[in-house]
Amino acid sequence: MSKSAILLALASLAVIAPASAQEDTAHHRAVYAKINAAEKSLEKVSGKTRFDDTSFDLTGWLDSGKPAKIVAKSPDGATTEFYLENGAPLFVFNAYRRAGEDGKAGQAIEERLYFKDGEIFKWLTTEKPAPVFHAEDYAATGELLANQCKAFGAALTKKSDAKPVATGTTLEGTFTGIEQGDYAHWNIRTKDGKERSFFILKPDNTVEKALDDPKKFVGKSCRITWKKSTEEIPEAGGKMEIEQILSVEWLDAK
């Protein structure tokens, strides 16, 4: 084979190799582009939830009431974008900083994770030096992201900003804090000076928002919706009648 023919063959391989390397993510890139192009036509919602003791600010784009894209931001500035297909993550983009020395900002890192059949099959990172990911890393990270995606999606589809719709009794007073024990209790002082305490079992997101940082709400006036119910309380030896909070509306101007 002539020298020119060899060079031509090598050049052809150089073009084919990158194209082949992207074939496995072609569908992912198409779905990513489609979702971002349709953002303006999708229902945009926001919310906040806790996952593994960390509070996340959420923004979601819903297609027919189901999340198509979720952006989650944590207090340390890290951002995770989920692009969903059939209710599960298809592509995930992470952006965060490694902790630096002496309190300085560390390396900025971006990650791109591609899923197939519920598992990560491709993991790209800008971290230097490049880490070596093992099978257990893929499995653990895939499970974590799938669980986060499910929890964040559930939080965004709860209509978190809606006014209380639960059937119950209303009570106005001053919020005095959260009491922690076997169960958390919402404490309130009524206008006639009485102290009341309500189980926190299955409230809506108006209550959950206050649980993220209850101290900043102490002393504020509120109207709660509550009800009496019979619940299984193992610590009390079985079923017992309790008073539980369902929702809260803050009356003070913020």
Image (cartoon, rainbow, N blue to C red):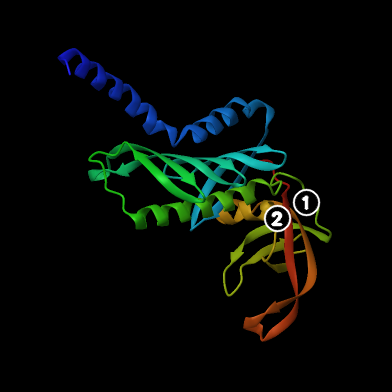
Corner quadrant of residue 46: top right
- Asked whether, in this view, residue 83 is left or right of residue 76, the answer is right
Q: Amino acid at mark 1?
A: Pro
Residue at 23% across, 44% down: 101
Corner quadrant of residue 99: top left
Q: Which mark is residue 234?
A: none
- Asked whether, in this view, residue 13 is left or right of residue 154, the answer is left
Residue at 39% across, 52% down: 138
Q: Which mark is residue 164?
A: 1
Picture coordinates of residue 181 (x, y %)? Answer: 57, 73
Which secondary structure lies at badge 1? Answer: loop
Circle 2: is it few (<14), some (14-19), or many (20+) Cα within 10 Å?
many
Picture coordinates of residue 17 (x, y %)? Answer: 32, 28
**Residue 231 position (above or below residue 173):** below
Which secondary structure lies at badge 2? Answer: loop
Q: Residue placed farthest to the top in the image?
A: 4
Residue 92 appears in the figure: yes
Q: Amino acid at mark 2?
A: Asp
Residue 78 appears in the figure: no
Q: Tell whether label 1 touches label 2 (CB within 8 Å).
A: yes
**Residue 146 position (above or below residue 242):** above
Residue annotated with mark 2: 204
> Closest to the observer: 59 or 213?
59
- Asked whether, in this view, residue 20 is left or right of residue 203, the answer is left
**Residue 84 position (above or below residue 35):** below
Q: CA distance from mark 2 to mark 1?
A: 8 Å
